[in-house]
Image (cartoon, grey):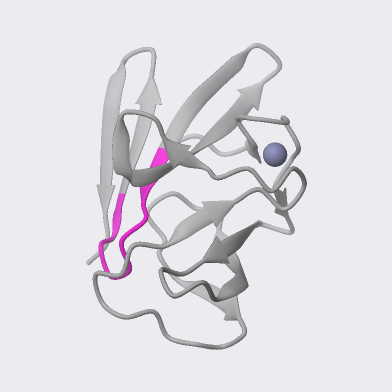
Amino acid sequence: MIQKYDFHCPHCDSKLDKNNEIILLTKRSNGDMGEIMMSTSVGNYSYKHSPANAFENGELVTFQCTNCKADLDAENYPDYARLIMKVEKDIQFDVLFSRRAGVQKTYLVTEDGIETYSGT
Ligand SMILES: [Zn+2]
């Protein structure tokens, strides 16, 4: 498993992780805005959210970059959001994670193929 990496916005390239947490804006289907802090460990699905509301199970959440405010929807996977994972200067992967609350699934797209991670 990769040990050292940063997460970046696919639109403005801002670094979105800090102290081992990825910080993103959230928009719920009812229009509520919030901020989410997720673990940078792929496969760890614990998160903190402000305000401290609970998402409804199966709710489709829109994630946005905290810098450019662009939606992070993955182009070909409407139920997923996409971030860029930078491992080294010239090595980067796409990370797709589920936008559906309660669906714990992450795809790591590398040059060797697609790795799948699921929560328990
Ligand atoms: Zn951005």
What residue is at 46 percent from the left and 69 percent from the top?
28
Q: Nearer the viewer, residue 84 or 86?
A: 84
What residue is at 45 percent from the left and 71 percent from the top?
46
Dominant secondary structure (helix, strand or loop) of the stretch shown in magenta: loop
Quadrant of ligand 1: it is: top right
Which percent across, then down, holds residue 10? 60, 30
Whether residue 119 is visible here, answered yes or no, is yes
7 versus 19 height, above or below: above
Which percent across, then down, holds residue 20? 66, 57
Q: Is residue 23 left or right of residue 3?
A: right
Q: Is residue 99 left or right of residue 8?
A: left
Instruction: Give the magenta part as a residue range.
Output: 96-105
73 versus 119 height, above or below: above
What residue is at 39 percent from the left and 30 percent from the top?
75
What residue is at 52 percent from the left and 54 percent from the top?
63
74 versus 53 height, above or below: above
Which percent across, then down, holds residue 22? 62, 55
